[in-house]
Amino acid sequence: MGSKKSKLLLIDDLETLLGQDRVLSHPTELLVYECDGLTLSKYGPEAVVLPHSTKEVSEIVKCCQKHEIPFLARGSGTGLSGGAVAAEGGIIIQMSKMSNILEIDYDNEIAIVEPGVINLHLSEATRKNGYHFAPDPSSQKACTIGGNVAENAGGPHTLKYGVTTNHILGLTVVMPNGDIVELGGKEELNNGYDLVGIFVGSEGTLGITTEIIVRLSRNPESYKTFLASFNTVESASHSVSQMIAKGIIPAALELIDNLSIIAVEDHIKAGFPVDAAAILLIEIDGISSELSNQANQIKGICHSSGAINFQEAKDEKERIQLWKGRKEAMGALGKITPAFYTVDGVVPRSKLPEILKFDIETGKLNGLKVAHLCHAGDGNIHPNILYNHMNESETKAAIEISKAILQKCIDLGGALSGEHGIGTEKISSFKIMFNDADEAQMLAVRSSFNSSGLLNPSKIFPTGAKCGESRIRKTIAGGGWL
């Protein structure tokens, strides 16, 4: 959409609006914006703009609509589904300058933040007063709360505390036509449609969030953190399903396999046993007097499932180190392979042994290794396919393995994504989960907010997802649009 002339005129308008220093258009300035955390495919924007306020975002959007140029919002670019890239060119609205914590209200246990606030920074700002922001993606040191809202992000503590949507009360949103609307509020109200619920997880295709009212969670009185080691991945995953079946809901329940364990220990020495086929990192929290019985139950389940060792973090320092190992595990994998591709499929917990075995065997059949960093408590498997991105055959193999894993997840009663979203990455797999009627209803919702299709086009849907909603994506050599 939009001619070369209209794109140049748009950049002129944006420079007039924001100043040249907040409009990036030189090719060298745009390189970093060609992809997000998914590096398999890259798309170059015409320009990147850096607004300071909701009003500026509104004016930017109106300019893009005037010139019929696609646009999208972007946070830290840590997403793993190709959701924050300019798939049809156009303008990236980079939200990093809108990074203020606007209000913290401890009496009502809420905070109001701009979308560029780093996830962890909010918890750091509130910790001394006994609060934190519960969603804790592994990238929480870098990812933004605006990005968390777009993807409905989760994290290790999702099992007990829920995903992002469970912690969002209100949003200020710039609509695709430039209108500014306020959804929800400081109180949980049941008046009219739950538009906050529609926007959270919509992958930036319905509007651009510029302020967020979040729920703050009280810090638990006490923690207990355990490391259970197993000789097989199957026995570790069996422990997971047994815990949940007995009504035990830990705050976090992570499964890490041997390849990931070795990478972590080579990287930071977290204390993971390198001879274990898999470990479970388990955390319970709450009132101190209630934790001992739960701890004994968990220990019994792990041993009955075949645990070869079960230990509790002896102090806060050891607890922090164990969690550092989990949080930095993806970075550690980056030190043992030129590239890796993270798949975000989900299965019912009872199917964990089957899917983990399938992942590893499928990797072997294609000549590649697969390392797991599972949010095991909710069945989010996170297999990481290790490959050399400079080797075309390995790259193709990684993509085929990912598709096979997603198909298997669906066959087992699971889903395409637990927290990363569909983006551009999983468009080709969309139809294995959704039929034409499902897609038509979702497109109707999208069109009701984003009628021009200019906001973040070519995301999520295999049909009608481009500007104008009229062209159909067809499978051709190399992929693409016809």
Image (cartoon, rainbow, N blue to C red):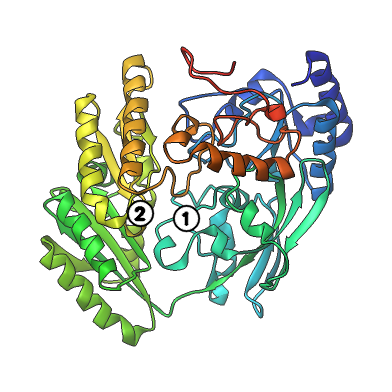
From what the image shows, is residue 135 above or below residue 29?
Answer: below
Q: Amino acid at mark 1?
A: Gly
Q: Secondary structure at mark 2?
A: loop
Pointer 2 residue: 375
Residue farthest along the top direction in this orientation: 477
Which class describes the residues within 10 Å of circle 1: few (<14), some (14-19), or many (20+)? Answer: many
What residue is rendered at 54% in x and 43% in y?
Answer: 438
Is tag 2's residue or tag 1's residue first in the polypeptide sequence?
A: 1
In contact (CB < 8 Å): disc 2 and disc 1: yes
- Residue 159 lies, with reference to residue 352, above or below; the image says below
Residue flagged by tag 2: what amino acid is it? Answer: His
Q: Residue at x 19, y 29 (%)?
A: 364
| Residue 422 coordinates in the image, percent (x, y) | 51, 39
Q: Residue at x 38, y 38 (%)?
A: 342
Quadrant placement of the C terminus: top right
Residue on which the image places disc 1 = 154
Q: Quadrant of residue 403?
A: top left
Which residue is rendered at x = 72% and y = 65% of the image? 192
Pick the quarter of the image with the N terminus.
top right
The image shows a total of numbered marks equal to: 2
Looking at this view, is 449 or 215 the one in front? 449
Q: Is 395 situated above or below 303? A: above
- Relative to residue 334, is residue 132 drawn left or right? right
Q: Is residue 103 visible?
A: yes
Q: Position of residue 172 (x, y in %)?
A: 75, 56
68 displayed left or right of 40: right
As helix, strand or loop, the secondary structure at mark 1 comes to loop
Where residue 105 appears, as percent x and y from the top left, is 68, 74
Q: Is residue 227 visible?
A: no
Q: Quadrant of residue 89?
A: top right
Q: Position of residue 187 (x, y in %)?
A: 69, 73
